[in-house]
Amino acid sequence: MALKNIEKLIPPGEVHMVGDGFRMQNYIPFEVSMERMNPIIGLDFNPAMHINPSHKPRGVGAHPHRGFETVTIAYKGAVEHNDSFGGGGAISQGDVQWMTAGSGVLHKEYHEKQFSEHGGDFELVQLWINLPAKYKMVKPGYQPLSHENLGKYTLPDKGGVVEIIAGEYEKIKGLATTFSPIHMYNIRMTKGGKADFSFPASYNTGLLVIEGGIKVNGKNVPAEQFVLFENKGEDFSIDALENTVVLLLSGKPLNEPIVEHGPFVMNTESEIREAYNDFRIGKFGYLED
Ligand code: MN
């Protein structure tokens, strides 16, 4: 097997606010295109920040999605999600929620009530995962993936742990059900820890350093940088230069046209028009802000 080299290091993109609750730095689709990392078509990161107490939870009110999935990872603090098909729940440190928008939902995302009352440290990632054409109109779904239930692989020499959200690592399966092959791990490493990874050359592969700092194939990568790997070679290694959290993503490309407009990601322009029309006539259900 051959070494998988770094194609590019991507610094954090422009900050955009999602509602009044999430201060997101974007990596995909502005710095890295949806096509280049598909089926991973969205990556927003709210780096660690302090949230002041508030009786009124901050966040974003009801809005629609169709044609893909949203995956939210809480690293610090807690968020609550509700959708128009009755899906919902709160997640806190280490938990993940995997929402399949499919044929269409309205959802809202706020800081969890108790967390909002007390305030505290907050850190979160939200990913958009594209659905293959034949699954774009599946029934909406919701998978709560609690930290305690995630597959976990303990690295040798007290190097840390790989939490498998989706896919597989060292024969340990991830918890999420996905519509196309995708590996998603949180790697929590202690200083001096080392881990090796191998993915098919064709898979679109990248990682984000959430906290700490690493060497990838011997090259330094500080916090908040996204590593985009070449579609050549399979293997790379990560060495932790300090206590570190890394989000690792690798997916089999769908190789289907991507037509994205606002909250909808489909394969053709006419499907986008249909989505707006269905949204207008109430096919996405109802949800209060
Ligand atoms: Mn949303």
Image (cartoon, rainbow, N blue to C red):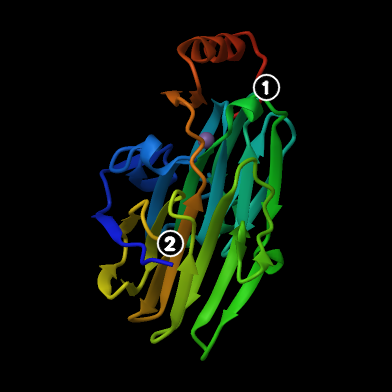
Mark 1, residue position: 286
Q: Is residue 234 above or below residue 277?
A: below
The structure residue drawn at horizontal position 52% and vertical position 81%, both measured from the top left corner, is 160
Q: Give whichever of 187, 171 is nearer the camera.
A: 171
Q: Give whichever of 30, 109 is nearer the camera.
A: 30
Element at label 2: loop
Element at label 1: loop
Q: Give whichever of 36, 99 is nearer the camera.
A: 36
Q: Residues within 10 Å of mark 2 (few under 14, many from 20)?
A: many
The structure residue drawn at horizontal position 73% and vertical position 30%, both measured from the top left corner, is 85
Image position of 272 (left or right of 139): left
Evaluate if marks 1 and 2 touch, with contact meaning CB atoms under 8 Å apart. Answer: no
Q: Residue furthest bottom?
A: 157
The structure residue drawn at horizontal position 37% and vertical position 79%, both measured from the top left corner, is 240
Quadrant for the C terminus, please. top right
Q: Position of residue 200 (x, y in %)?
A: 49, 56
Task: Tell me, yes or no, if residue 18 can be seen here.
Answer: yes
Residue 3 in which image quadrant: bottom left
Q: Amino acid at mark 1?
A: Tyr
Label total for image: 2
**Mark 1 within 8 Å of ligand 1, using the beta carbon:** no
Residue 163 in which image quadrant: bottom right
Q: Amino acid at mark 2?
A: Glu
Q: Give whichever of 67, 243 is nearer the camera.
A: 67
Task: Tell me, yes or no, if residue 53 can be seen here.
Answer: no
> What's the distance in space between the residues labelled 1 and 2, CA to CA?
46 Å
Mark 2, residue position: 234
The structure residue drawn at horizontal position 28% and vertical position 43%, both measured from the top left corner, is 31
Nearest to N terminus: mark 1 or mark 2 = 2
Quadrant for the N terminus, please. bottom left
